[in-house]
Amino acid sequence: MSKALLISMIGQGRPKKEGQSSYDLIDYQFQDGEVISTTVFGIALYKYLRRKGEDIDLLLVGTKGSSWTELVVEENLLEEFEELIKLLEEKERERNVEENLLKEFVKLIEKSLNAEVKYVLLNSPPSPEEISQKTIGVLVDLFEEKNYNKVYIDITHGFRYMPTVVLLNLMILKKLWNFDIEIYYGFGIFDTGRSEGPKKVARLNHLEDLIKLSEALSILENTGDFRHYYKLVSDNQEAQQIYFRIETNAQINNSNIRELINTPVNSEYVKPIHEKVRSKYLEPLKADRMEDRLKNRARFFFERGQYLKAVLLLHEALILLVGKLKNMIGGSCLEYRQREETKRYLDQLDYYEWRVLKHLRNACAHGTQPHVEARHAWENEEKFKEVMEKGFEFYEKIKNGKIEV
């Protein structure tokens, strides 16, 4: 069943005076035209989402100086819990809200909203480290218990950097729990002045898009998988199939790669990013020969510490390179018999670089003790890197005719 969480920042507002509110009562108008009147935007957003059918919990993030008492506006509750509210207001003025007092007040908020409410209480002002430490701790416990599939975040109130830190915390947790993020801002008097009429509520879709783009670029950087990136930035329908063929070492026409590289992106701000993506990740795929493409992929994974993929690809690139140079392998397809014949030929040449790379490849692929010549590289990362670098150099020397085969 779908379950969501709303995270709302609680600000300080104006200095609290006897009988006066820290925040103005504002009519917040949502994109579908619905208007909800509250002093603190997070409460309006919570009520709106509930009315839209969301099964949603509420997490409040504020400081010892935040205007917590603004969260309850019902007259009957204000009268019933007058003593508690006065005590809390006094602590708010002193910027010294106490945990036990806030805990009791949160029960009142739960009663007001008929909801489950959690809170994070920070110093005033809080350090970014404190925000992360306390917020992440609460969020991890909540995700373990509830496994939310969507998180709404209200960035309207609070110290200006608080929503930024909380949002970055969410981006980290998103790597561990798969949930969507929606970001909201409620415009107030400080934004638009005391103009007549309701204040606009903005869903900040662009920030959500930037988060998704950042995630897609992380995937591309670490794995070479460009499918998520292309899904976000273009209408290219062939990226999925092209990636599949590259990943399975299938034959692929260079014209398909060129089409992929030259695909126009759908947003102006993406264009300079795409130029770097093209040169860094896509151009190396545009090799005229499959063996060069394999070698380029080996280099890509080697530089990212994905050594198994790297050694397998470099090993196959060398076989294909030598096989084609000696006409043992045809240009269009690679048969098992041709591959084995080329391997035997390379064994007969008895180049040290090939022997060590072959033994290292076998050990990595099968998890078995390697031949003595490769054992040092199998047991030590720096030695492994040396063998791989010599393997890349060996490939280039064969390709350029500096080593006779």
Image (spheres, rainbow, N blue to C red):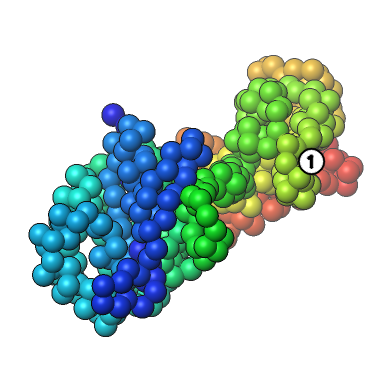
Q: Are there few (<14), some (14-19), or many (20+) residues within 10 Å of tag 1? A: few
Picture coordinates of residue 79 (x, y %)? 13, 61
> For this view, does 244 lie left or right of residue 372?
right
The amino acid type found where label 1 is placed reads Glu
Identify the image quadrant of residue 347: top right
Query: Looking at the picture, does residue 126 appear above or below residue 109?
Result: below
Identify the image quadrant of residue 339: top right
Query: Looking at the picture, does residue 25 appear above or below residue 347?
Result: below
Q: Is residue 57 visible?
A: yes
Query: Looking at the picture, does residue 289 appear above or below residue 188?
Result: above
Q: Does dot 1 land on a helix, a strand or a loop?
A: helix
**Residue visible at 43% across and 51% down?**
27
> For this view, does 342 lie left or right of residue 3?
right
Picture coordinates of residue 371 (x, y %)? 53, 44
**Residue visible at 39% across and 70% down?**
13
Picture coordinates of residue 379 (x, y %)? 48, 54
**The C terminus lies in which quarter of the figure?**
top right
The front one of 300 and 404 is 300
**Residue visible at 25% across and 65% down?**
69
Q: Can residue 311 be seen in this view?
A: no
The front one of 221 and 118 is 118
